[in-house]
Amino acid sequence: MKILVIGAGGTIGQAVVAELGARHDIIRAGRNSGDLRVDIKDYASVQQLFHAAGALDAVVATTGSVHFGPLGEFTPEQYAIGINDKLMGQVNLLLAGQHVLNDGGSFTLTSGILTHDPIRYGSSASMVNAAVEGFVRSAAIELPRGLRVNAVSPNVLIESLPSYGAYFRGFDAVPAARVALAYSKSVEGAQTGQVYQVH
């Protein structure tokens, strides 16, 4: 398969490339690194990405920014960061990609544990992750040509504990390599409309 991985330079992205790259052709994409560049917030940039990538069998998104902060100080503009980037950025990938992906191809998006297990300062992440999962379940029943879409919902990563561990006390952190297996299940399996929790 020819697989486009957006966010390939990140911790999860690198693990996904290592997992799938042994068996498939990988095109790495990112905002600042990779074989191709893309700003997922910009629909025209996403369209250009698919034009440059050519025929594809799968699209994996391991990217998306959200703002963390106390609810009492949150602004609409700070909520818009997650809405425009992690939510609509991934939606943009499916909206544009559905027209060019090979028959039977798949999309794998990324949500996260905060959908169901919230933390202080994480209201934007919880909101956006839940929206991503709702979108996946709904889009799955409308995609044409045997196309599929799933999401992976990872716990906090062991590799991220030095930066984020203080916010995730009591969480059973998981290694990125284990999270990558869920992306493999989505890409190489047959299910659609699923949220694979790696908690």
Image: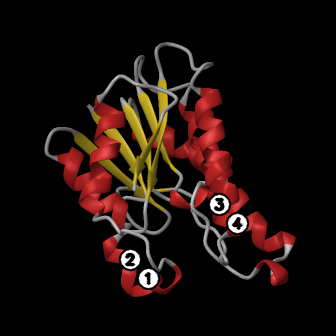
Tell me if residue 165 can be seen. yes
- Residue that badge 4 annotates: 124
Q: Secondary structure at mark 1?
A: helix
Name the residue located 54 percent from the left edge and 33 percent from the top edge: 97
Within-10-Å neighbours for mark 3: few <14, some 14–19, many 20+:
many
**What SS does tag 2 mark?**
helix
SS at circle 4? helix
Q: Nearer the viewer, mark 2 or mark 3?
A: 3
Query: What amino acid does circle 3 point to?
Result: Ser
Q: Marks 3 and 1: CB-CB under 8 Å?
A: no
- The residue under label 3 is 126
Q: Residues within 10 Å of mark 2 (few under 14, many from 20)?
A: some
Along the polypeptide, which appears first: circle 2 or circle 4? 4
Residue annotated with mark 2: 160
Rounded to the nearest angstrom, the CA distance separating label 2 from label 4 is: 19 Å
Give residue 64's quadrant in the image. Answer: bottom right
Q: CA distance from mark 2 to mark 3?
A: 18 Å
Categorize mark 4 by other alpha carbons within 10 Å: few (<14), some (14-19), many (20+): many
Q: What quarter of the picture does the N terminus occupy?
A: top left
For residue 165, which numbered disc appears in the image? 1
Q: Are marks 4 and 1 in contact (CB under 8 Å)?
A: no
Kind of residue at disc 1: Gly
Q: Earlier in the sequence, mark 3 or mark 1?
A: 3
Between disc 4 and disc 1, the foreground one is 1
Q: Is residue 75 left or right of residue 86?
A: right
Is label 3 in a helix, a strand or a loop? helix
- Disc 4 and disc 3 in contact, CB within 8 angstroms: yes
